[in-house]
């Protein structure tokens, strides 16, 4: 079993690196060094980890939850939860897969909570945006896709987000969602077909 | 829609949604770092002792400092041992750092001058810290822990630094670059 402290680190570059990472001494350090420093209570090192992964984690949460305020909350909670449980992280697994698993579990909890405590739906354009009258055709298609995603069942939406936003392999998606790789493939295939139908139906409805 | 075009559209839709919302993530790293200030990742019962401290350079320097202070403190420990051996029966003379009385009450002793906190972690307490005390402020920290006969791996944590080589242990084990001490209580390789 290999732990964070192991010299045989399997550090892979993070998936999405945010450019605004702070200019601290930690900025140029490799991921394993940052994790080791974090284990020793160097919270700025953890801050650097957050800077590197926040877009990826937030995108996952926004894709899963389809609600910006909830996505912000869960992103924050995921990084706190990951820090608290950092000793459980093993280098056999990519760090990205581990943090995404934490975020996905928190999203699932939040969705369960939302089922029992519904809130007013977010406006269709989750990210704010432009006057519909001036939306260019491409933006309009994006918007239809996002709305279609919101209507998809979670079990199809989640693999699609991990595949098309986080660019993960079927195997990694299976690990994160605790489902077999074959099921991931099926859900992505079916999810895309359902989403296409949703988008096309909307075009017909709104003509 | 040609094959692959929908995939691209889906990818762009998701990425641009995050890009549009990126403003809300400004400064998240600083907020989280500040929220966590002074807080260490949790130690869980299933954790191994080797996870307690990463072998960073700072850690090694700290350990060297502890070694220096500890060497000096052994002078005091000698006096302490001489005192205790006059009060306790035979086995304790051989193993003053981890010695058992008849009822398996095991005494842990470590010299640590100027230390603020000293604890012992081992497989007997799930590698959760059990504090040692230095009531008379002589730099000799002690704790009595009841143990059944068996083999025990342990280490001391002195002001957060791993101290795995108790000179009076029966043996040492090393994994991932860190040592732990081993003592046998009440049988085979008996140190207690």
Image: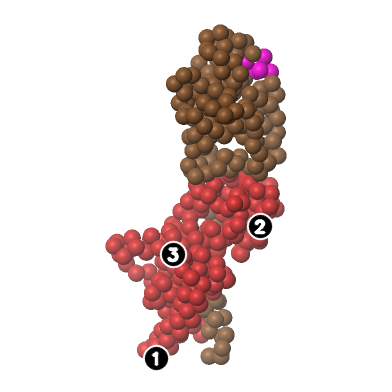
Chain colours: A red, B brown
State which tag comes first along the sequence, 2 or 1: 2
User: Which residue is tagged 2?
Assistant: A11
User: How many residues crowd around disc 3 within 10 Å: few (fewer than 14), some, or many (20 or more)?
Assistant: many
State which tag comes first along the sequence, 3 or 1: 3
User: Which residue is tagged 3?
Assistant: A68
Query: In the depicted view, which residue is nearer to us: A29 or A11?
Result: A11
| Residue B29: % across, % down | 56, 52
> Which numbered disc, 2 or 3, marks the residue closer to the eye?
2
Image position of B173 (left or right of B142): right
Is residue B88 visible in the rendered image? The answer is yes
User: How many residues crowd around disc 1 within 10 Å: few (fewer than 14), some, or many (20 or more)?
Assistant: few
| Residue A86: % across, % down | 54, 49
Q: Which residues are magenta?
A: B72-77
User: Which residue is tagged 1?
Assistant: A204
Query: In the depicted view, which residue is nearer to us: B134 or A17?
Result: B134
Image position of A123 (left or right of B74): left
The residue at 34%/63% (across/down) is A112
Asked whether the beta carbons under mark 3 and mark 1 sit within 8 Å of each other, the answer is no
- Kind of element beneath mark 1: helix
Query: In the depicted view, which residue is nearer to us: B173 or A88?
Result: B173
Chain letter of disc 3? Answer: A
- Kind of element beneath mark 2: loop
Q: Marks 2 and 1, how far apart in space?
A: 48 Å
Position of residue A7 relative to residue A196, above or below, is above
| Residue B120: % across, % down | 54, 30
Asked whether the beta carbons under mark 2 and mark 1 sit within 8 Å of each other, the answer is no
């Amino acid at each position: 079993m290999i732990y964070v402290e192991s010299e045989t680190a399997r550090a892979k570059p993070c998936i999405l690196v945010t450019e605004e990472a702070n200019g601290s001494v930690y900025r140029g350090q490799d991921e394993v060094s940052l994790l080791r420093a974090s284990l020793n209570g160097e919270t700025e090192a953890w801050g650097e980890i957050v800077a590197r992964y926040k877009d990826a984690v937030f995108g996952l949460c926004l894709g899963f939850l389809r609600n910006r305020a909830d996505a912000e909350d869960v992103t924050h909670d995921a990084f706190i939860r990951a820090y608290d449980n950092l000793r459980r992280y093993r280098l056999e697994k990519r760090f990205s897969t581990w943090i995404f698993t934490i975020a996905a579990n928190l999203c699932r909890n939040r969705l369960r909570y939302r089922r029992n405590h519904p809130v007013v739906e977010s406006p269709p354009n989750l990210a704010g945006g432009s006057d519909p009258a001036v939306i260019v055709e491409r933006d309009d298609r994006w918007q239809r896709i996002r709305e279609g995603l919101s209507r998809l069942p979670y079990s199809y939406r989640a693999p699609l987000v991990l595949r098309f936003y986080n660019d993960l392999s079927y195997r990694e998606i299976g690990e994160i969602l605790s489902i077999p790789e074959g099921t991931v493939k099926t859900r992505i295939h079916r999810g895309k077909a359902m989403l296409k139908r949703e988008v096309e139906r909307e075009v017909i409805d709104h003509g | 829609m040609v094959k692959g075009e929908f995939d691209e559209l889906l990818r762009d839709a998701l990425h641009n949604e995050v890009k549009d919302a990126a403003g809300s993530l400004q400064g998240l790293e600083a907020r989280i770092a500040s929220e966590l200030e002074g807080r260490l990742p949790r130690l869980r019962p299933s954790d191994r002792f080797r996870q307690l401290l990463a072998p960073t350079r700072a850690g090694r320097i700290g350990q060297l400092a502890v070694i220096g202070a500890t060497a000096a403190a052994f002078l005091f420990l000698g006096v302490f041992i001489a005192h205790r051996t006059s009060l306790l029966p035979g086995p304790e003379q051989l193993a003053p750092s981890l010695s058992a009385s008849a009822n398996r009450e095991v005494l842990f002793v470590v010299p640590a001058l100027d230390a603020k906190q000293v604890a012992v972690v081992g497989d007997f307490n799930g590698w959760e810290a059990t504090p040692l005390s230095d009531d008379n402020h002589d730099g000799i920290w002690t704790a009595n822990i009841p143990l059944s006969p068996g083999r025990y791996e342990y280490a001391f944590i002195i002001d957060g630094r791993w101290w795995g080589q108790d000179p009076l242990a029966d043996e040492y084990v090393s994994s991932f670059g860190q040592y732990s001490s081993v003592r046998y209580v009440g049988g085979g390789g008996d140190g207690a």
